[in-house]
Image (spheres, rainbow, N blue to C red):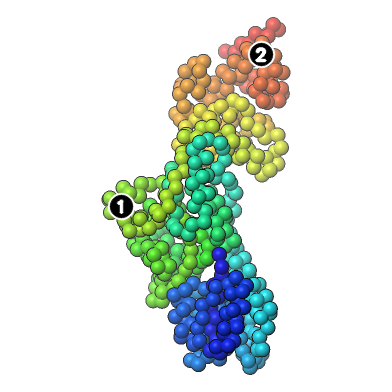
Amino acid sequence: MPKRILLIDDDDQIREALCEGLESQGYEVSQAARLETGIRVFSTEPCDAAIVDYSLPDGTALDLIPRLKALDATVPILVLTGHGTIDLAVKAMKLGAEYFITKPLQLDVIFDLLGRTLQQQRSHRRNLVQNIKGARYKRDPFLGSSDAIGRLREQAEKILGTDWPILIQGETGTGKGVLAQWLHQHGPRGEEAMVDLNCGSLSRELLDSELFGHERGAFTGAISQTGGLLEVANRGTLFLDEIGDMDAAIQPKLLKVVEEKRYRRVGGAQDRTVDVHLIAATNRDLRALVAQDKFRSDLYFRISTIPIYIPPLRDRVTDIPVIADFFVKQLRNDLARAQLALSPAAVAALASYKWPGNIRELRNVIERAALLSEWGTISPADLALPMAHVAPGADESTDNADLTLQQLERQHIVKVLKLENGSVDKAAARLGIPRSTLYARLKQHGITLDRVGTVGIEV
């Protein structure tokens, strides 16, 4: 996405030459010949940087810099002057200018400094985002080969180039945030920052301040001016998770951002401009909330321009082994356990479970099993799945509804041993576990083998 540069200079020839040169470098340019005109342009058109002549008909760069910074504290400013002195340069830098450039101008120098400045700005915003959200798993939202996940991938790829708001719907734990991250990274704003905020985790006051920022003295404890997450996300993506839980008092302010790209800090009187791509997510029925007057209808229609639905894990059972294997591979590196694996019985148990918490629950179950398992292979007992959510018919040989996981594992081991005529080596191979692990399981479950290979259970 092209960067927009605000160019303020009262010399028509210099301004036109700079404008032509900047456009040849792929920038978009907004022009002004006076200080006040520049302020008005900046407040209506989001700009990524400003190039400003020091002397203007209605003021100087020293008057202009604080006003631009008040509108957007992150905007880089390059000051041009025909009468540069060290004293002026120091004053301009203290006010927030990045560079103080003396005339005659060399376009190559300006382009180089501008490129460096914009890169520093981008890195700064990314660092802010990392500090805000911390480390997280980098996951593929399309793991698996089911028809459901195939349709989701097709739909996501079709909307990659759009700048319209996107509404991701799905149950808790289906990976709405992972899909939002993928859409951002593969879209036209992928090089910019992505900021995410859970609307249901904050009170109205905190959500207001976090999202829009606040002025000094706006409320008790506001001892300094603070920019909000909208400023961090400028030119990038704003992901609002659980938007159905957003307080009704915040909704009209968000609507103004979506429709006009404008907002005000808490306690502020000055409109600010922002350019963000909005992705929202919810596990609630927003239409029902609109009917109950708990969610604004105009905001709903604006954010749901492009709806996309993530199916629950129970509707894509064939993907469960693939996703589980992905998590196990990550844990091999994280825990330095190269032998970590899921036994076939564990995979069968995972596939027979209903997963009310979806992919998030699956990840948590596997992480816990990996930490608690005594051997390199994770068994059904290690998974400790609640039997209330195991699908009926998981084992066709008997009704397992009243069995514990340990009983289920013992039953499966006995069945495999009988199929292999009591051969521990062959049974271990069929189960996908080492021979020593199977012997340990036999002892744990009280399973005995007599000399002729018949299988019994100690009582």
Q: Which residue is mark 1?
A: 290
Disc 1, SS: helix
Q: Which mark is residue 311?
A: none
Task: Tell me the quarter of the picture where residue 447 sits.
Answer: top right
In this view of the protein, which residue sits in the foreground, 158 or 203?
158
Which residue is pictured at 58% across the width and 29% down the height? 347
Q: Which residue is mark 2?
A: 420
Instruction: Give the quarter of the figure containing the N terminus.
Output: bottom right
- 372 vs 28: above or below: above
Which residue is pictured at 57% across the width and 22% down the height? 409
In this view of the protein, which residue sits in the foreground, 295 or 188?
188
Which residue is pictured at 48% across the width and 28% down the height? 390
* Label total for image: 2
Find residue 287 and report its horizontal and vertical position in percent: 33, 49
Which residue is pictured at 56% across the width and 27% down the height? 348
Find residue 142 and report its horizontal and vertical position in percent: 55, 43
